[in-house]
Each structure stands twice: as structure tokens, then as C-alpha cells.
Image: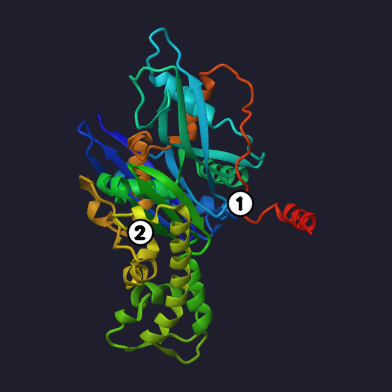
Amino acid sequence: MNEKIVVGLDIGTTKICAIVGSADAKGNVNILAIGKAPSDGLSRGVVTNIDKTVKSIQQAIEEAQNICGMEIKSVTVGIAGDHIQSFQSRGVITISGPEKEVSEKDVNRLLADTRKIALPSDRQIIHVIPQEFIVDGQDGVADPVGMTGVRMEANVHIITGMVTAIRNIERCVEKAGLRVDDIVLEPIASSLSVLTPEEKEVGVALLDIGGGTTDLAIFEEKTIRKTSVIAIAGKKVTDDIRRGLGILQDQAELLKLNYGAAHMSEIVQDDPLLIPGISGRAPKEVSRGTLCQIIQPRMEEILEIVRDEIQASGFGRNLSAGLVITGGGAMIRGVTTLAREITGLDVKIGVPIGLYGGMINEVENPMYATSVGLVIHGLNSGKASQAISRQALKEMEDSLPEEEESRRPEPPKPAGKGNFMDKLKGWFEEL
């Protein structure tokens, strides 16, 4: 009865997964139940049909409840989608207290200050991730509590999402009869279940290839340095197979999972595959090589974008632990070979690790990385991710006196948006 129990709910484009986990007094994580349901109410990680999504959530939760024998009332929810954006910010405060010693309250006050930026009305902060603290000019401080100083600064990584997208996820969960404990960016959750502290310290890139989006998170010196969401993922591969072979969506998905390959070196025997015909038509034959020729170009496109994102981040040379691929897309044979060729990094498949008991064999699969990570995040109250959740941020702000709005500039706009006219004017002025 002393165990803390948490439910992680991964609301994905192709599936909705609920995992029930608990932690005992020693901190050992046990997996108590898994519930899954097909998802057809989302597109690229964003809810497009409330009723269908609610029905799928209820189905996954009911299956999990039947396995663990408990009633589920609240969940920690994952969020993704190409509406996610991130940028760097900075905050500064003076140290309070007669001894000028940095306290936990001072750190909370500083982190709350970093989020006081001019955001568009349609965007909302999801996470504030500390990069480093600076106390009286001394930089590189990971934990300033207990240090003495007058001025403290912080460089942070802020992750935002569309207000409507976040609210629609909350509405779906609430209409399913559940309470939202927290909303967590999915690559942050996945990192908790598949990456080791050593990998995060020496530098590693986590690539989560889901159904609707591909999520990238770069870690160095034990913290997140870069996050990115790519709007191409496993569902595009399935669509390519469906269109290329003229078959049903379900047939294309089965072919991808059971016989698909992302690299021609995986094709040892090019045996023909028999596909049932539609509406009484004769069956179709397709070779494994033909299937690979459809899958490989799309996977190359995804991995080339990932390579460019890593290079643009400036951390490409610091990834001593290479690239860890997880999510449903990691289950396509040959993906590590292809990723190694395109990125030039050491590559491995990431599966949930560090679990103690229960249904651990069932979740040792890349497709459960996010769900298990959401459970770990909930059990650790977000501390293990080094990401200050919006719930914690709200509590920080509620405890602070009202201050003048920040005078820091607005976060930078994405490249290529809103600055065309400025460039055009500049060109004419130079003539």
C-alpha cells in the first residue's frame, strides 16, 4: 500500500497506449498493466476528431483497468506534433536572504522569471529546461542551491505548443472521465525510459519515430540541448506502400511490420509475398525487394532531415554515444544500417530499461518507450527529466508576488516566416 501508482497515456497518431506503473519504497519501477487501442482521431500528433479520440482512450484505459484490477482516475499525458516549438531564454534575479545563500525558493523564483516572455496568444509553455546557472559571473553551475552570491542567472530551453492543441488533448482526457496530472513532451518521456545517465552525459541524440511525427532530442552534459519535431513518420511509410501497391491501409501496415526493410542489405531471399485481392479480385504478388524500394526512400528522407537538424544544432561532434532510435519506426528492419550510413553516427535501437518487475517483458519494445517514460516521469514528479513541468511552473508563479511584465524580446520567429517583406525592403535600400 506504500507504492506510488502512476498511469502514462501516450495519445499517438496510430495507437493510444496506457501503461500503469508503480514504484516501491526503494524506487524500483514495476509495470502493472498495459492497455492499447487503435487511434484514428489524430493527424500528425494533433487531435482532429474529439469523439473518436475519447473512445480510443476509454478503450485503452478499460483494458489496463481489467489487467491491474484498479480504477484509473488520472493520467500523465504525452504531447507531440509539428506545432511544438522551442527556443533559448535567460533570466536573472538578485539573491534574497540576509546570508545571500541561494535557496530552493530562489531557484524557483528564477525559473519562473525565465518564462515571463512575450509569447503569441495562441502559444503556451509546456516545459522550462535549465541549461546552466550563473552565480555572480561563475558559469557552468548545475545546482546553485547552497552557494553564496548576490546575482543569479539561468540559461533555459523553453518548449511551447499551440494552446488549442494542448486544450484539445485535455478535453479528450477529461471527456474520457480522467484527470490530467501533467502534460509531457514525448521525446522527454522517451528519454527517461531508454537513455542511461552516461549517454546523456557524453552526448546522445534520441530519435523517436512514431506514427505521425518524428521527435528528436539532443542531450549533452546530462541535460537537453535541442528538441525538434519533424512532421514525417511511420504513417507516411505506410501510405507510400498503400499507394505504391494499390492495397488497403491495414494490409500496408502488416507488410511494413512483418516483411518491410529500410535497407536492401536486409533482403537475403527476395521471396514473393501474396496479398489478398480486393472485393473478389485475384491476389497480388510483390517481392520483398520491391517493398524495400518503397520504404527506403521515405526513411532516407526522415533520416536526412534528422542529420541536418543535428548539424544545425552545433552538437553533432559532441555525440559520443551516437544516435538512439526508438518508437514504432525503430521496428523496421535495417533502420540502424540506414541511419548509420546517413548520419555517420553510431546507432542502436532504444527499448525501455531499468524496470524491476511486473510486465517488463511485454514493454521491452521501442513502441512502448514513450508510455513507460510517462510513467517514470510521473513517479519522479518530473525531476529525472530536468524539465520543469507547467504544473510546477504554475505553482511557482502562484507563490510569487506579481511583477512587471518582462522586457525581454519576443522569442525568435521560425526561419522563413514573417520576414520576407523586411528582406525585400532591405534589397531595395541597397540598390
Residue 271: x and y in percent read: 32, 89
Residue 343: x and y in percent read: 38, 66
Categorize mark 2 by other alpha carbons within 10 Å: few (<14), some (14-19), many (20+).
many
- 244 left or right of 3 in image: right
Residue 149: x and y in percent read: 40, 18
The residue furthest top is: 98
SS for dot 2: strand
> Could you tell me which quadrant the C terminus lies in?
bottom right
Q: Is residue 373 above or below residue 364?
A: above
Q: Is residue 378 above or below residue 138?
A: below
- 419 left or right of 375 in image: right
Q: What residue is rendered at 32% in x and 73% in y?
A: 334
Q: What residue is rendered at 60% in x and 33% in y?
A: 117
Q: Which residue occupies the foreground of this view, 349 or 342?
A: 342
Q: Residue 414: which disc?
A: 1
Q: Residue 326: which disc?
A: 2
Q: Which residue occupies the foreground of this view, 380 or 255?
A: 380
Q: What residue is rendered at 50% in x and 69% in y?
A: 236
The residue furthest bottom is: 282
- 78 left or right of 325 in image: right
- What's the residue type where badge 1 is placed? Pro
